[in-house]
Image: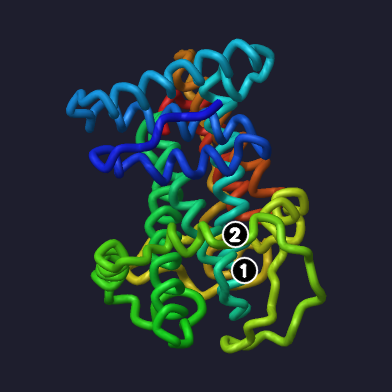
């Protein structure tokens, strides 16, 4: 389906529409929810000009058409399934980009993966407030996309991983602000990436190596076991804690994640609490895909506590 052009007054939804277009033939679930979120944002931002109305009506028609065509796809008809699908997709993109960044394999594909991950975390707001981990990943992904993009544009060598100083929270915000003020944004740079480059043997890790071609996004999504464990420590100013390539709990925190839970007699679990417990179990399953035992235990304990006591 051809959509009317996005007018300048709705520039705020362009990146959601772009992400949807990229996934029309790759993942209809991502395309559907990206356009739905674009519609929600667009309706709030609209000044009801003819161009805006034409685009928004086109999005409505497309969404209705997709819902009918894919009535058997639970991730289009069920918000819990949709949220789990998008969270899993966003996290895999994020982990791929984080791994490449920490290995100093800088390039446009890494910028694109970080940026797309940040956009997906925006879209997850369709289902309510983001978790602390999602908020953390969104901020870090957007900062990293802007930071690496600006370094490459200015001929500078990016610093892999989090900021060297944990006390400089403002730099994360400043980098994104600087990127939005320049003519070429991380989104523009990411759009120039070949969506399916041919994989090549890995070159020696070097910040100045231009011949390194990282795996395509599709390869990463189809091979989650190759990805590192997600950085799930509590957010601190400046970014993540230093990367530790292991799924086992850190010795310093191992003693704190095994907490006995005392069931409450006669506890009544509401439907909303049941859905929340299901989400925790899904998060735990996703963490095990990355051999992240610590996160799996934490989420399973949250589910067990909620079901046993009726409170989080």
Of 189 and 267, nearer the camera is 189
Q: Around disc 2, counting alpha carbons within 10 Å, would you say few (fewer than 14), some (14 to 19), or many (20 or more)?
A: many
Q: Is residue 233 left or right of residue 197?
A: left
Q: Is residue 177 above or below residue 272?
A: below
- Residue lying at 45% horizontally and 19% vertically, measured from the top left: 272
Q: Looking at this view, is 15 or 119 the one in front?
A: 15
Quadrant in which residue 204 is drawn:
bottom right
Indicate the position of residue 22 as horizontal and vertical percent values: 58, 43
Residue drawn 38% across and 33% down?
38
Q: Which residue is mark 1?
A: 99
Q: Circle 2 sits in a helix, a strand or a loop, which is it?
A: helix
Task: Tell whether label 2 touches label 1 (CB within 8 Å).
Answer: yes
- Is residue 123 depicted above or below 61 in this figure? below
Colour scheme of the rendered structure: rainbow
The answer to which image quadrant residue 45 occupies is top left
Q: Which residue is mark 2?
A: 95
10 with respect to 92 (left or right)? left
At 59% from the left and 65% from the top, the residue drawn is 109
In the image, residue 116 lies at what x, y percent?
A: 50, 52
């Amino acid at each position: 389906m051809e959509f009317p052009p996005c007018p300048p007054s709705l520039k705020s939804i362009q990146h959601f529409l772009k992400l949807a277009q990229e996934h029309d033939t790759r993942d209809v679930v991502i395309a559907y929810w990206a356009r739905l979120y674009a519609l929600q944002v667009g309706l709030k931002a609209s000044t009801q000009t003819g161009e805006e109305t034409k685009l928004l009506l086109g999005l409505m028609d497309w969404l209705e058409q997709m819902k009918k065509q894919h009535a058997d796809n639970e991730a289009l008809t069920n918000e819990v399934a949709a949220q789990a699908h998008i969270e899993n997709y966003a996290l895999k993109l994020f982990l791929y980009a984080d791994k490449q960044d920490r290995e100093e394999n800088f390039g446009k594909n890494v910028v694109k993966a970080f940026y797309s991950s940040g956009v997906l975390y925006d879209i997850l707001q369709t289902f309510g407030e983001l978790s602390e981990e999602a908020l953390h990943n969104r901020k870090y992904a957007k900062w990293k996309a802007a930071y690496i993009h600006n370094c490459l544009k200015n001929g500078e060598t990016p610093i892999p991983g989090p900021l060297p100083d944990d006390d400089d929270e403002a730099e994360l915000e400043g980098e994104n602000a600087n990127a939005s003020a320049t003519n070429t944004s991380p989104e523009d740079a990411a759009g120039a990436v070949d969506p399916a480059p041919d994989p090549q043997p890995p070159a020696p890790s070097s910040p100045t190596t231009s011949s390194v071609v990282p795996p395509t996004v599709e390869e990463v999504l189809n091979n989650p076991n190759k990805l590192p464990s997600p950085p799930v420590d509590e957010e601190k100013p400046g970014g993540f804690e230093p990367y530790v390539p292991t799924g086992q709990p850190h010795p310093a925190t191992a003693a704190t994640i095994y907490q006995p839970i005392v069931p409450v007699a006669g506890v009544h679990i509401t439907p909303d609490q049941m859905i929340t417990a299901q989400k925790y179990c899904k998060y735990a399953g996703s963490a095990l895909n990355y051999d992240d035992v610590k996160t799996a235990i934490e989420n399973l304990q949250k589910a067990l506590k909620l079901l046993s006591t009726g409170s989080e």
